[in-house]
Amino acid sequence: MSPERLGRGAAEVFTGRFFLVSYLPTLALSLFVLVLVRAGAPGERIDFGLAWRTTARLNAGELTLLVLAVTLAALVSHPLQLPLVRLMEGFWPAVLRPVSERCVRRQARRRSRLEADANRLDESMTDAELQAAGAAGTRLRQLFPPADRLLPTALGNALAATEHRAGAGYGWDAVVAWPRLYPLLGETLRAVVDDRRNTLDAAARLCASAFMAGAAATALLSRSGWWLLLALGPLALSWICYRQAVGATLRFGEAVESAFDLHRFDLLRALHLPLPAGRSQERVQAQEVCAYWRQGMPVAFAYEHGVEDRTGTTSDGVT
């Protein structure tokens, strides 16, 4: 492999997303466990002063080894980000089906309460009550998919709501259309989408890392008396990060919706399909295209090529 290709490969791996989503949470988890071990865990006597003194005496070789170990762990775990998010969404193994069904029923109750608040409309309602009902309707639309598509977790339902909502008004199925639409986004909107997705993934990874830190602290401090309460810190942080991940999902969903609003016709042009004359025609066309992508349904596409395609000349004059 040439140095140039090696450099490009390293640049693709060591991006801002890698450091934000994988490296920093892995580093925080590693340092937390290392400090506990250096302080005497597992054991009855915990001395964080000892941890500081022994850590401060690390030589250059030991520090280099620590950095390399954290980097390797981050690299190995980086491809697992999507399975991690799927796990946090509620796509659990069959053995957990009873737990999953119980959680889905809980989410259904939350959805029903929000739906009742959103539908509580009456002519005698005050402006404040009408605004509260409208806010409940917005939250219902953002946080929950249709009742038959509920998942066991709040994060899973927020992402499912985005998948159901984005592009639906125009007939698009976001699940199959998004991979084709994303490459067509302009620089500004793509930066917004990427930033919000990175925030979502970073919050999810921090949630998982903090939970593992809490579990590790529970195991390491189980014989250390009141020091065991330290495990509550990472567990509380894990819950906070989970709520932040749900909030980041709502902001990510807004960006995806905006992408369909602004660039759905760019997708049709890229496919060399004619632009629809009206809303009803657009919905039928989008549904046909999505059915073709999703299930291979036969569709009699009528293509519309530009002048450069008919003449064999590209827009910059190169034949």
Image: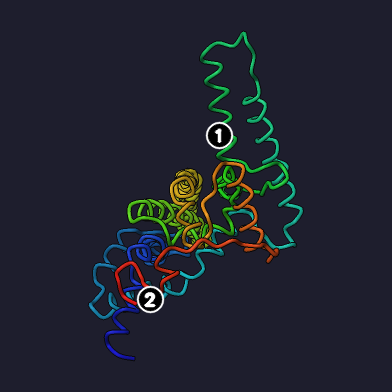
Q: Quadrant of the C terminus?
A: bottom left
Q: Residue at x 40, y 56 (%)?
A: 185
Quadrant in the rendering for residue 133? top right
> 194 left or right of 83?
left
Is label 1 or label 2 in front?
1
Q: Earlier in the sequence, mark 1 or mark 2?
A: 2
> 209 left or right of 176?
left
Per the image, label 1 sits on a secondary structure element best described as helix
- Spatial CA span between label 1 and label 2: 43 Å
The amino acid type, in three-letter code, at marker 2 is Ala
For the question of whether residue 94 can be seen, the reply is: yes
The amino acid type, in three-letter code, at marker 1 is Arg
Q: Residue at x 62, y 10 (%)?
A: 123
Name the residue furthest top.
124
Q: Quadrant of the N terminus?
A: bottom left
Q: Position of residue 10 (x, y in %)?
A: 33, 77
For the question of whether residue 232 can be seen, the reply is: no
Name the residue furthest right.
98
Question: 151 or 77: which is nearer to us?
Answer: 151
The crowding category of the residue bearing disc 1, from other C-alpha atoms within 10 Å (few below 14, some 14 to 19, many at least 20), is some
Q: Residue at x 63, y 25 (%)?
A: 117
Q: Position of residue 278 (x, y in %)?
A: 56, 42
The crowding category of the residue bearing disc 2, from other C-alpha atoms within 10 Å (few below 14, some 14 to 19, many at least 20), is some
Would you name the residue on which mark 1 appears?
A: 139
Would you name the residue on which mark 2 appears?
A: 69
**Residue 136 higher or lower than 12, as above or below:** above
Q: Position of residue 242 (x, y in %)?
A: 50, 48
**Dot 1 and dot 2 residues touching (CB under 8 Å):** no
Q: Position of residue 115 (x, y in %)?
A: 66, 30
> 31 left or right of 236?
left
Per the image, label 2 sits on a secondary structure element best described as helix
